[in-house]
Amino acid sequence: MAVLALLLMALLVTGGLYAVANGANEAKAETPTYTAEDVTEGEKLFISNCASCHGMDASGTENAPSLIGVGAASVDFQVGTGRMPMQMQGPQAQQKPVQFNDEQTAQLAAYVASLGAGPTVPDSEYLDASAGDPAEGGELFRVNCAMCHNAAAAGGALTRGKFAPSLDGVSEKHIYEAMITGPQNMPVFNDANISPEDKQNIISFLKNIEANGSPGGAQLGSLGPVSEGLFVWTAGLGMIIAFTIWLTSRSS
């Protein structure tokens, strides 16, 4: 009788814990952002377009990592910028035309978010570039980002065929999502590293330099003194050679 009583208690405890966990997952799916229907539709899209690389349960394969715990923000960034699904294997995912509309992207994000906790899509409160401090954002960008993306956010080469892309024209939401998810070789800047307000300042700086353009003339890719020096030497030597040829032709 004691054994039966213990077995019954174990079954009751197990069933109770399962019910609590299942209820928590349902509550998570029924957030103000995503509904259970979004999760269901997102799972269908995932199986049709992503499971061949990431696995039917999104736990990853030898060709692609696990998506459990990456969060909605990672999916919204990768799919929303056209990097996913990948067109071909390579050192890093290439940006290309977006293959899913906003609703489908949100549904995919909802499904992946239901698999495990992770960074969420940022609130619009921190995406208003006009409310940030571009001067403070510029300082933060130069300290944390310029070594890869260039001081003018023009991008730069990394190792083994990888690169940090130009940030010109990137939307405020995708800039914020990149900071909190760390795509490709980029490190993750969580709120303990850079606060949401400082992320907004960085976005403000990027949008400020994007709006100002290049008031000093041709920006030469905004690659700094290397490209400028190369241009000066090439143009200068070309002018000297042309002038020399002109002089010799007149003397003859």
Image (tube, rainbow, N blue to C red):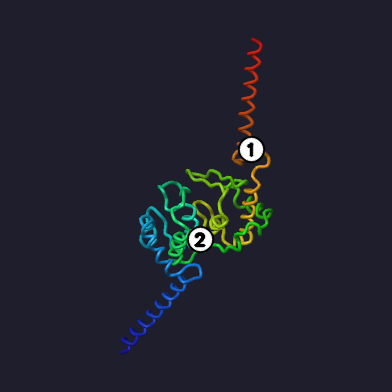
Helix, strand or loop for disc 2: helix
Residue 98 vertical placement versus 67 (above, below): above
User: Dot 2: within a 10 Å radius of its alpha carbon, few (fewer than 14), some, or many (20 or more) residues?
Assistant: many
Helix, strand or loop for disc 1: loop
Amino acid bearing label 2:
Ala
Q: Is residue 116 left or right of residue 201?
A: left
Residue situated in front as seen by the camera: 170 or 191: 170
User: Dot 1: within a 10 Å radius of its alpha carbon, few (fewer than 14), some, or many (20 or more) residues?
Assistant: few
Spatial separation of the CA atoms under disc 1 and disc 2: 36 Å
The residue most toward the bottom is: 1
Image coordinates for residue 122, horizontal then vertical, percent = 55, 62
Residue situated in front as seen by the camera: 183 or 105: 105
Q: Looking at the rendering, in which quadrant would you find the C terminus?
A: top right
Q: Mark 1 = which residue?
A: 218
Amino acid bearing label 1:
Ala
Residue 98 vertical placement versus 251 (above, below): below
Circle 1/circle 2 CB separation < 8 Å: no
Residue situated in front as seen by the camera: 12 or 243: 243
The residue most toward the top is: 252
Q: Mark 2 = which residue?
A: 73
